[in-house]
Image: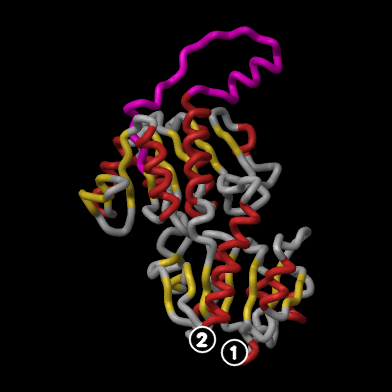
Amino acid sequence: MPDRLVVLYRGNRPPATALIERLTDTVYATEEELPYLLPGADALLAWVTITPAIREAWPDNPEKAPRWVHASSAGVDSFLFPALVDDPGVTLTNARGVYDQPTAEYVLGLILALAKDFPGTWEHQQRREWRPRPSDSITGRTALVWGTGPIGRSIARMLRAVGMRVCGAGRTARVDHPDFGTVHGPADLRSALAEADYVVLAAPLTQDTRAMVDAPVLAAMKPGARLINVGRGGLIDEEALIDHLAAGRLAGAALDVFGQEPLPVESPLWTMPGVMISPHTAGETTSEREALVEVFLDNLTRYIEGRPLRNVVDKRRGYVVDETRPV
């Protein structure tokens, strides 16, 4: 079992702490306390994941670094710093699976909100204006889901179920994917972008995907298309996106994640027509905390018993490749 588990938290501690404490010696640390409590710990539960605190507190001496780090998130870009990535003795796991269905539901809601102009309807209601107008239909529209991991696959299934035509974009092209049908690789991405009414970003943030949606990609999108980002803010060149939105080349965007969070109040995105902003909540539900702890407790039990861990991240790629690996 871990000699000492450090739980990094902000505000509220995770639920089921009594059960965690029965399984192992547990210490709780805020981001300010982490540099003093992390050295010498055997394991780290990062209940806070979007933070520089872990990188800044990571021990210089590898012998003092934890052997297992669990991220209570799907994205692990905050953990991919050299000292952790380059140490073969450190296993990184994540909360893969918790956010798949909630994020897919959120994406469907965003697409409906954009197509039916729910923000405009709300504004008219606030002004007590009776303004009938037609709206778009999503049936038969094409959605390109960029990112073919578990979240992307859940989004594809959800959108296909409501009558949308769905295809994927990833590192490797396929024509027989069970959820996407066709997965477009880099060679034919431009033609796929030109056909898509909605482009949904659900990829992890890695060296290969940072700023992947740049000015040329935006220019390749179908005129009047809409962009949705529930992956990571760093996937988009925000300045290029602002330029394309301002020029009217895109009909709109729904953005849940940003390069800087919270989104600065001076960002033009807040007030641009056709743009919906949400505060990194696409995967959050009222039962999220319990589901996150359930995944961690399963892995903690596996760790104690010396069994393979779930959701082991390939630290070079930045996402889960193999489902399990030995401790």
In the image, residue 195 sits, relative to residue 204, either above or below, namely above
Residue 162 x/y as whole percent = 39, 31
Label 1 element class: helix
| Horizontal side of residue 191 vs 203, given as left or right | left
User: Where does label 2 land, which residue?
Assistant: 89
Pointer 2: residues within 10 angstroms few (<14), some, or many (20+)?
A: some
Residue 152 x/y as whole percent = 41, 49
Q: Locate the N terminus by quadrant.
A: bottom right
Question: Is 33 in front, or is 70?
Answer: 70
Tell me the CA gap for discs 1 and 2: 9 Å
Residues under numbered marks 1 and 2 in contact, where contact means CB atoms less than 8 Å apart:
yes
Question: Is 116 in front, or is 93?
Answer: 93
Residue 69 x/y as whole percent = 58, 75
Question: Is 277 in front, or is 69?
Answer: 69
Mark earlier in primary sequence (1, 2): 1
The answer to if 85 sits in the magenta stretch is no
- Tell which residue pokes out farthest to the left in this image: 175
The image quadrant that residue 27 belongs to is bottom right
Residue 230 x/y as whole percent = 51, 47
User: Where does label 1 land, which residue?
Assistant: 62
Label 2 element class: loop
The answer to if 131 sits in the magenta stretch is yes
Question: Is 58 in front, or is 238?
Answer: 58
> What are the residue bounds of the magenta stretch?
116-144
Amino acid identity at mark 2: Gly
